[in-house]
Image (tube, grey):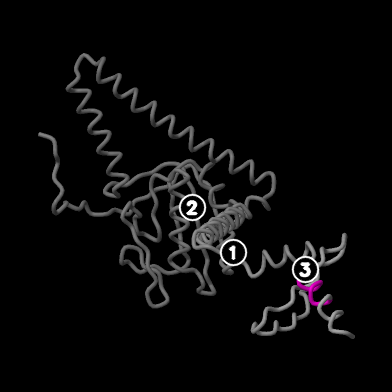
């Protein structure tokens, strides 16, 4: 090539503009820009992470669970509430199991007993109202007050065990040849009789009063410190139609004693005499507030 041609080529090169990168093709990818002089070479790109499905994103968001302190406290309170409700339902089911398995005639007898208790309370209420009316209308209120005071003293003496009493009622005999009857079983019988309206109770010659206690001592039973032994004989004054069914309710006193292989007999009577007495106890600290 001649020197003239070389000069023309150099002139054309100076007149051409600098090279610019080509525009990206439609739908294609843009080629990477060339590295600048002196820049470190780019590291090769690693394999692309696979895209997660919707179920995988849901599982990743739910597990492991992120529990706040408030959520934990609420969960504990709900657990405690549910446990308490379960215990309450179980206790109610246990308490009603005896009545649920009872026969129809037993249920009728229990309802009759409840009606009789309600009637006794109504009669007592009516009696008190009648006493108030007599006091208000009596021409000699002082004499009427003395009469009612004497009657009340007699009634309280029966309840306190300081005077003898007689009237209709029942006798309860418990034969315990196996020695399995304990003080708490006899106490259950006393409580059941009181709830059925017993007005005076005597057990083997010991008068039962409001403060009576029963204990087991050396294989024997003591009533207010008095040792008694089988057979246990209860003399009870009250309405026989209420007292006997109260002992024979399903799961009651008679069934409990029979489970302990004791023999139980209940007999009604038109006249029961309760003659065991308790000495009148003078209170050490309590005094009358009247006068």
Predominant SS of the magenta segment: helix
Task: State whether residue 129 is above or below residue 168.
Answer: above
Label 2, label 1: how many angstroms apart (C-alpha)?
17 Å
10 inside magenta stretch: yes
**Quadrant of the frame with the N terminus:** bottom right
Q: Earlier in the sequence, mark 1 or mark 3?
A: 3
Label 1, label 3: how many angstroms apart (C-alpha)?
128 Å
Q: Give the x, y percent position of residue 81.
A: 54, 55
Camera-near label (1 vs 3) is 3
Q: Which residues are magenta?
A: 9-16
Query: Is label 3 in a helix, a strand or a loop?
Result: helix
Q: Which residue is mark 2?
A: 171
Q: Which residue is mark 1?
A: 258
- Mark 1 packing: few (<14 Cα in 10 Å), some, or many (20+)? some
Residue found 64% across the figure and 41% down from its top: 108
Q: Which residue is mark 3?
A: 15
- Mark 2 packing: few (<14 Cα in 10 Å), some, or many (20+)? many
Q: Give the x, y percent position of residue 103.
A: 69, 48
Q: Give the x, y percent position of residue 163.
A: 28, 46
């Amino acid at each position: 090539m001649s020197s003239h041609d070389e000069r023309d080529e150099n002139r054309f090169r100076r007149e051409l503009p600098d090279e610019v990168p080509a525009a990206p093709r439609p739908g294609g990818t843009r080629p990477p820009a060339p590295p600048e002089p002196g820049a470190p070479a780019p590291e090769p790109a690693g394999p692309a992470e696979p895209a997660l499905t919707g179920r995988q994103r849901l599982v990743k968001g739910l597990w492991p669970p992120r529990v706040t302190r408030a959520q934990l406290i609420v969960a504990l309170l709900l657990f405690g509430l549910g446990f308490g409700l379960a215990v309450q339902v179980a206790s109610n089911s246990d308490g009603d199991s005896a009545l649920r398995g009872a026969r129809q005639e037993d249920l009728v007898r229990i309802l009759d007993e409840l009606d009789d208790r309600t009637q006794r309370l109504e009669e007592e209420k009516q009696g008190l109202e009648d006493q108030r009316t007599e006091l208000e209308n009596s021409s000699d209120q002082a004499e009427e007050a003395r009469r009612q005071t004497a009657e009340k003293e007699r009634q309280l003496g029966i309840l306190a065990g300081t005077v003898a009493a007689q009237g209709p009622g029942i006798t309860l005999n418990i034969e315990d040849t196996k020695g399995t009857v304990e003080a708490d079983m006899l106490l259950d019988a006393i409580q059941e009789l009181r709830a059925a309206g017993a007005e005076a109770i005597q057990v083997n010659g010991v008068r039962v009063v409001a403060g009576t206690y029963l204990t087991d001592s050396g294989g024997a039973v003591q009533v207010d410190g008095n040792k008694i032994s089988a057979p246990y004989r209860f003399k009870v004054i009250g309405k026989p139609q209420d007292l006997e069914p109260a002992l024979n309710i399903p799961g009651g006193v008679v069934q409990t004693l029979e489970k302990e292989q004791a023999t139980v007999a209940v007999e009604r009577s038109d006249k029961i005499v309760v003659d065991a007495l308790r000495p009148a106890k003078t209170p050490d600290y309590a005094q009358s507030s009247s006068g």
